[in-house]
Amino acid sequence: MAERSPATSRAERRLTLLSLAVVRIRDVVDAGLLEPWTACLCDEEHRVRARGLDAPTTARALVSRGLLRRALSRVAPLDPAAWRFEIGEHGRPWAPRPAPSFNVAHSGDTVACVTGAPAELGLDVEETTRALDLDAVARVSFSEGELRGLGSRSGAARRARFFALWTLKEAYLKARGAGLVLPLDGFTMSDVDTASPSITFAPGFGDVPEGWRFARPELGPHLAAAVAARDAEALRVQVEHVDVAGWLA
Ligand SMILES: CC(C)(COP(=O)(O)OP(=O)(O)OC[C@H]1O[C@@H](n2cnc3c(N)ncnc32)[C@H](O)[C@@H]1OP(=O)(O)O)[C@@H](O)C(=O)NCCC(=O)NCCS
């Protein structure tokens, strides 16, 4: 076998490969696969059925946990039913080793789960057709720099930029695990339309841009998604639209 040049091997070491598994809830429910898909859930997770939630919310919670358990078992040697989750201070689920870092997101009919190496991972997915007062949300959520970028656009381009910024910001918040404890206007996403979006922080925010990497994987029409990872070098996100029956086999 030919030896790799030092430059190549250095570049390979720097590439962080993340897996992003995506499921449409109706693919599970309509195929009558909800029972087998959720057979790996623990008693506590099954109890969502008794909480009096509407059917779509219940199905989303069940499918989401089934996806997380199965996605973890594809990258770590443990049965899907064997994972035990803990909940962090601000609601972030985590699992002890051998679990890799992970984060889950849902929007409408879509649930997604990212798994991979860096210690802090965040994922957000949003249906871009949802009814939302974009300007009102932007005013309370975006920094001045982000608002300037939004202000120069109109129509579909404005909506696309809004959801690009929204998902990037939320992916960062979720990677930090702190939710809305952190001020949304205290950090600014830039280079949003490039392969490597970047982040800057207002003075006193308490974080530094070095080490943060972002990606905006393509999930399909009417969906926006973003991944944030700390301690990564170049980031590559491999998207898999899950064949639900195939993953059960
Ligand atoms: C949980 C939170 C981080 C995201 O909420 P959300 O948008 O409703 O939910 P998402 O679909 O993106 O993610 C939910 C999943 O994130 C995970 N999660 C929960 N709390 C989390 C936290 N503090 N950090 C990271 N992940 C968290 C859970 O796995 C959850 O799924 P589950 O309940 O099925 O296990 C919420 O607390 C929050 O802070 N939202 C901010 C919303 C906002 O204003 N964003 C503006 C961006 S401009």
Image (cartoon, grey):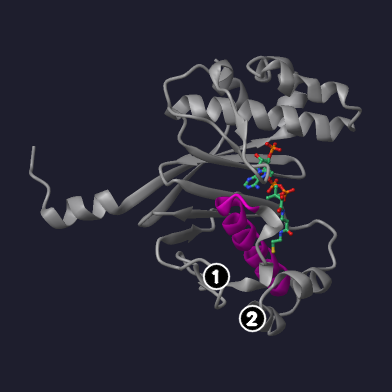
User: Around disc 2, counting alpha carbons within 10 Å, would you say few (fewer than 14), some (14 to 19), or many (20 or more)?
Assistant: some
Alpha carbon separation for disc pair 2 and 1: 10 Å
Instruction: Say which residue appears at 66% left-offset and 29% top-offset.
Output: 65
Is residue 74 shown above or below 216?
Answer: above
Q: Which mark is residue 149?
A: 2
Quadrant into which the N terminus falls: top left
Amino acid type at image mark 1 = Val
Instruction: Say which residue appears at 46% left-offset and 64% top-offset.
Output: 195
Counting from the top left corner in percent of width and height, residue 222 is at 70, 54
Q: Is residue 221 visible?
A: no
Q: Which mark is residue 192?
A: 1
Q: Which residues are magenta?
A: 157-178
Counting from the top left corner in percent of width and height, residue 225 is at 61, 54
Labels 2 and 1: the sequence-earlier one = 2
Q: Is residue 148 visible?
A: yes
Q: Are marks 2 and 1 in contact (CB under 8 Å)?
A: yes
